[in-house]
Amino acid sequence: MFAIVRTGGKQYRVAAGDIIAVEKLAGEAGDSVTLDDVLLAGDGGEMKDLKGLTVAAEIVAQEKGEKVIIFKKRRRHNYRRKNGHRQQHTVLKISAIGSEKAPKKAAPKKEAAKAAEDKPAAAKKAAPAKKAAPAKKAAAEKPAPKKAAAKTEAKPAAAKKAPAKKPAAKKPAAKKEG
């Protein structure tokens, strides 16, 4: 099973046993952390329900990342500044995805009962969606010919409204007396 988790403004695809480096999190090596912001979860081609889903992880280490060199220069002004930066990272080992193991066993009975009650409602909801899709296609096709017709009509109308202007008459130049 995999999950896509958001932490530190970035998204990570994780599975149980993965080791990832994320933006600095509070805690020391050996502490456990839960990542609540799960964007997507699945197993193979199936997508899982995200309601209440969390990812459990253990902090392996608090480290610094690779050094980044910042070099500023303005030519012909004798201006050079060199600086370096190492970002703080937390190394996490993903221990489990979906910490709700006990409620999931009880949930299938409830879901099966709800599914049996909701089958007619689900069929009603699905049927209008199928009918709505062809209507959208038909609606999309109808405006296209109108636009083409409007373009063909626009050209003659523009020609009628704006008659061609005659060039301005040149005035004769004044003769020099001399």
Image (tube, helix red, strand yellow):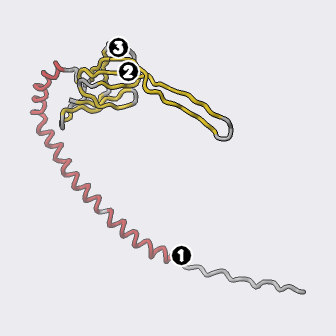
Q: Residue at x 20, y 35 (%)?
A: 47
Query: 167 and 97: which one is in front?
Result: 97
- Of callouts 3 and 2, the N-terminal one: 3
Helix, strand or loop at label 3? It is loop
**Residue at the spot of label 2:** 90
Q: Are marks 1 and 3 in contact (CB under 8 Å)?
A: no
- At 23% from the left edge and 22% from the top edge, which residue is drawn? 96
Whether tag 3 and tag 2 are in contact, CB under 8 A, the answer is no
Nearer to us in this view, 65 or 153: 65
Q: Is residue 55 visible?
A: yes
| Relative to 65, residue 148 above or below | below
Instruction: Report the front residue among 92 and 127.
Output: 92
Q: Residue at x 15, y 39 (%)?
A: 122
Distance from the alpha carbon under mark 2 to that under mark 1: 71 Å
Q: Is residue 52 visible?
A: no
* Disc 3 to disc 2, C-alpha distance: 9 Å
Residue where numbered disc 1 is placed: 162
Q: Is residue 93 above or below residue 70?
A: above
Write down the residue under mark 3.
29
The quarter of the rendered structure image containing the N terminus is top left
